[in-house]
Each structure stands twice: as structure tokens, then as C-alpha cells.
């Protein structure tokens, strides 16, 4: 947690598989955040300049996906510092037998880090004294966005494109068969919106996508 330095979850992985499940477990226990900041690893960011399934998963929960600048780990400085601390305090000092043993060690470390270890940035308080659970609960069913009647919609085709004025624009295979809302920002700029989020901007005069940054509408 960026404010309190509270560490919500540590899970060992051998690959990107299961990352979404880890987030669902965290959201179930601690509620939904307003945003998730991550690096640009394959499990978080899309390939081929498209959007990822993880980003769509967050947006379906009304969570803003934010990514650090490529090759700029300082954007996630607090997390990078935690990784360094975890590595120095635990991983380098303790032989880890397997994933189950690693999870046991991480669970114990999490309790120590959140409730016992003084944190300089908190005036030597512990993170648990500053953390508050989110009031937004994980819904029982994750639903796709619904759009108001009369909005201009486009369906993403089987290759990840939408069509507009006889021209195709690539968004991502992540959204195949999903609907996007098109909203004019000015006479030549259209926002491509997925639910509560703008995911791209199109210059219809130049017939090109000028932005693929995700932000709340």
C-alpha cells in the first residue's frame, strides 16, 4: 500500500501463471483499491502495444491499471526497496526448499514486516497502524461494462481491431468480441472507452491512434 507501506500479500511464483488468482485473494481479504501500479512485465502489460488481460481484469473491477515507465524502476521505488529488504533479510539468509516452504517463510515475514518492524517513513511506526482496509468489496461476479442507450459503440473483431470510417484501429486481442464506446473529445479526436476508462485516443483526420494510455473518464 503506497500510503501505509502495508504489504498485502507475498506469494512465490515460478512463472506468471496464477498472478490473477493472487490478486483475487488479496482483493477478497482487503477489498478493492482505486488503482494498481505495476512494472511492464508480461504478466501485467500487453504485447504488441496492445492491452493485457490483466488490465482488462482490473478495469472490469473499476480499478485503474498504472504502469511505471519502461527501464525506470524508481517509479515503483517503494516496492523495489521492499524487494531489496526481503532479499537481504530473508532470501539470502534462509535456504528455501520448495514453494510451500517459501510461502511459510513469506507469511511469517509478512507478519513481522507489517506489525513488528518499525518503518522510518512512518516515524518508526509499523505499517499496520496506518493501513485501512478498502471499503470496496470484491463482487461475487465480475461483470463486463454496460453502456447507456444511444451511445456510439464498436465491437472489437477477432484480431483485436475496431472499425471507424472505413479504417481499422488495433486495440488488443484482449477485447475480442467486446464493445467499446466512442466519444468525441473535439472535432477530430475520438476517445475509445471501455466502461469507466478511456483506453485509447484516435485522430480521425490522420487515421491513427495517438494514445493508448489508460485513465478514468
Image: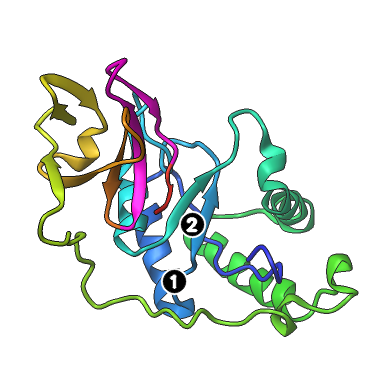
Q: Secondary structure at mark 2?
A: helix
Q: Residue at x 73, y 71 (%)?
A: 113
Q: Quadrant of residue 204?
A: top left
Residue that protrudes farthest toward the front in the picture? 187
Residue range of the region highlighted in magenta in the rendering = 196-213
Queried whether the magenta region covers residue 206, the answer comes back as yes
| First of labels 1, 2 by sequence position | 1
Q: Is residue 35 above or below residue 169?
A: below
Left/right of residue 98 with respect to residue 199 in the rendered view: right
Expressed as whole percent of the image width and height from the top left, the position of residue 33 reads 49, 68
Q: Which mark is residue 99?
A: 2
Q: Is residue 66 above or below residue 110?
A: above
Q: Is residue 209 above or below residue 18?
A: above
Q: Residue at x 20, y 45 (%)?
A: 180
Expressed as whole percent of the image width and height from the top left, the position of residue 138 reads 35, 75
Queried whether the magenta region covers residue 82, the answer comes back as no
Q: Secondary structure at mark 1?
A: loop
The colour scheme applied to this rendered structure is rainbow
Left/right of residue 130 with respect to residue 205 in the rendered view: right
The residue labelled by disc 1 is 32
CA gap between label 1 and label 2 equals 27 Å
**Mark nearer the viewer, 1 or 2:** 1
Left/right of residue 155 with respect to residue 45 in the rendered view: left
Expressed as whole percent of the image width and height from the top left, the position of residue 6 reads 67, 71
Residue that protrudes farthest toward the top in the picture? 206
Amino acid at each position: 500500500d503506497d500510503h501505509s507501506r502495508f504489504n498485502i500479500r507475498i506469494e512465490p511464483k515460478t512463472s506468471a501463471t496464477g498472478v490473477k488468482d493472487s490478486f483475487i485473494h488479496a482483493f477478497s481479504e482487503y477489498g478493492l483499491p482505486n488503482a494498481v501500479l505495476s512494472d511492464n512485465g508480461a504478466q501485467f502489460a500487453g504485447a504488441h502495444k496492445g492491452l493485457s488481460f490483466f488490465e482488462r481484469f482490473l478495469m472490469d473491477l473499476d480499478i485503474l491499471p498504472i504502469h511505471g515507465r519502461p527501464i525506470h524502476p524508481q517509479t515503483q521505488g517503494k516496492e523495489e526497496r521492499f524487494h531489496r529488504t526481503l532479499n537481504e533479510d530473508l532470501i539470502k539468509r534462509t535456504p528455501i526448499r520448495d514453494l510451500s516452504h517459501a510461502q511459510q517463510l513469506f507469511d511469517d515475514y509478512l507478519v513481522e514486516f507489517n506489525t513488528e518492524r518499525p518503518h522510518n517513513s512512518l516515524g518508526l511506526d509499523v505499517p499496520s497502524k496506518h493501513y485501512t482496509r478498502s471499503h470496496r468489496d470484491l463482487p461475487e461476479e465480475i461483470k463486463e461494462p454496460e453502456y447507456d442507450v444511444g451511445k456510439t459503440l464498436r465491437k472489437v473483431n477477432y484480431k483485436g481491431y475496431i472499425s471507424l470510417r472505413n479504417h481499422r484501429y488495433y486495440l488488443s486481442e484482449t477485447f475480442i468480441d467486446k464493445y467499446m464506446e466512442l466519444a468525441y473529445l473535439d472535432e477530430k479526436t475520438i476517445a475509445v472507452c471501455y466502461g469507466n476508462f478511456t483506453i485509447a485516443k484516435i485522430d480521425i483526420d490522420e487515421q491513427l491512434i495517438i494514445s493508448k494510455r489508460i485513465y478514468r473518464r
